Image (tube, rainbow, N blue to C red):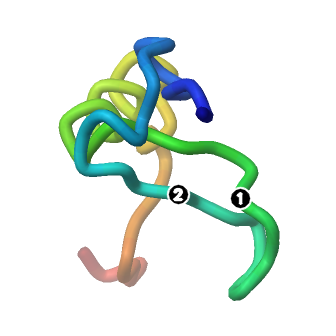
Amino acid sequence: MADCTFCGRPVEAHDPLYLSETPGGEPTSQFCNYGCLSAHVDAADLATGSACEWSPEQ
Protein backbone atom coordinates (compact mmCIF):
# COMPACT_ATOMS: atom_id res chain seq x y z
CA MET A 1 0.00 0.00 0.00
CA ALA A 2 1.24 3.47 -0.88
CA ASP A 3 1.19 6.22 1.72
CA CYS A 4 -0.24 9.67 1.06
CA THR A 5 2.43 12.23 0.19
CA PHE A 6 0.70 14.75 2.48
CA CYS A 7 -0.77 12.93 5.49
CA GLY A 8 1.05 9.58 5.39
CA ARG A 9 -2.08 7.40 5.51
CA PRO A 10 -2.64 4.49 3.10
CA VAL A 11 -4.15 6.00 -0.06
CA GLU A 12 -5.98 2.82 -1.08
CA ALA A 13 -8.25 3.19 1.97
CA HIS A 14 -9.65 6.42 0.52
CA ASP A 15 -10.33 7.90 -2.94
CA PRO A 16 -6.72 7.92 -4.21
CA LEU A 17 -5.20 10.36 -6.65
CA TYR A 18 -1.85 9.55 -8.29
CA LEU A 19 0.34 12.19 -9.92
CA SER A 20 3.16 11.76 -12.41
CA GLU A 21 5.76 14.11 -13.84
CA THR A 22 4.85 12.96 -17.37
CA PRO A 23 1.61 11.75 -18.98
CA GLY A 24 1.38 7.99 -18.51
CA GLY A 25 4.54 7.94 -16.38
CA GLU A 26 5.10 6.26 -13.05
CA PRO A 27 3.40 8.05 -10.13
CA THR A 28 5.76 10.39 -8.32
CA SER A 29 3.28 11.27 -5.56
CA GLN A 30 -0.04 10.02 -4.31
CA PHE A 31 -2.81 11.53 -2.21
CA CYS A 32 -5.83 10.16 -0.31
CA ASN A 33 -8.13 12.52 -2.22
CA TYR A 34 -8.28 16.03 -3.63
CA GLY A 35 -8.44 17.45 -0.08
CA CYS A 36 -4.96 16.12 0.74
CA LEU A 37 -3.66 17.34 -2.63
CA SER A 38 -5.07 20.82 -1.99
CA ALA A 39 -3.64 20.90 1.54
CA HIS A 40 -0.23 19.83 0.18
CA VAL A 41 -0.27 22.59 -2.47
CA ASP A 42 -1.18 25.18 0.19
CA ALA A 43 1.34 23.95 2.78
CA ALA A 44 4.20 23.84 0.26
CA ASP A 45 3.14 27.19 -1.30
CA LEU A 46 3.23 25.56 -4.75
CA ALA A 47 0.73 27.93 -6.38
CA THR A 48 2.61 31.15 -5.63
CA GLY A 49 3.74 32.76 -8.85
CA SER A 50 1.70 30.37 -11.00
CA ALA A 51 -0.98 31.37 -13.46
CA CYS A 52 -3.09 29.61 -16.09
CA GLU A 53 -3.07 32.73 -18.23
CA TRP A 54 -0.99 35.85 -17.96
CA SER A 55 -1.01 39.09 -19.83
CA PRO A 56 1.17 42.11 -19.10
CA GLU A 57 -1.90 44.32 -19.63
CA GLN A 58 -3.67 42.83 -16.58
Task: Label 2: state its secondary structure.
Answer: strand
The x, y position of residue 45, in whole percent, is 46, 26
Which quadrant is the N terminus positioned in?
A: top right
Residues under labels 1 and 2: Cα distance?
Answer: 6 Å
Camera-side residue: 53 or 3?
A: 3
Q: Amino acid at mark 2?
A: Tyr
> Which residue is drawn at the image coordinates 25% and 39% (left, top)?
14
The x, y position of residue 11, in whole percent, is 42, 35
* Tally of marks: 2
- From the viewer's perspective, is 12 left or right of 57? right
Q: Are marks 1 and 2 in contact (CB under 8 Å)?
A: yes
- From the viewer's perspective, is 19 left or right of 21? left
> Which residue is drawn at the image coordinates 42% and 44% (left, top)?
47
Going from N to C along the chain, the mark reached first, 1 or 2, is: 2
Count residues near mark 1 (Cα–Cα under 10 Å), then give few for <14, some for 14-19, many for 20+.
Answer: few
Which quadrant is the C terminus positioned in?
A: bottom left
53 over 31 or under it: above or below: below
Task: Label 1: state its secondary structure.
Answer: strand
> Which residue is drawn at the image coordinates 31% and 82% (left, top)?
57
Count residues near mark 2 (Cα–Cα under 10 Å), then give few for <14, some for 14-19, many for 20+.
Answer: some
- Mark 1 = which residue? 27
- Mark 2 = which residue? 18
Camera-side residue: 13 or 19?
A: 13
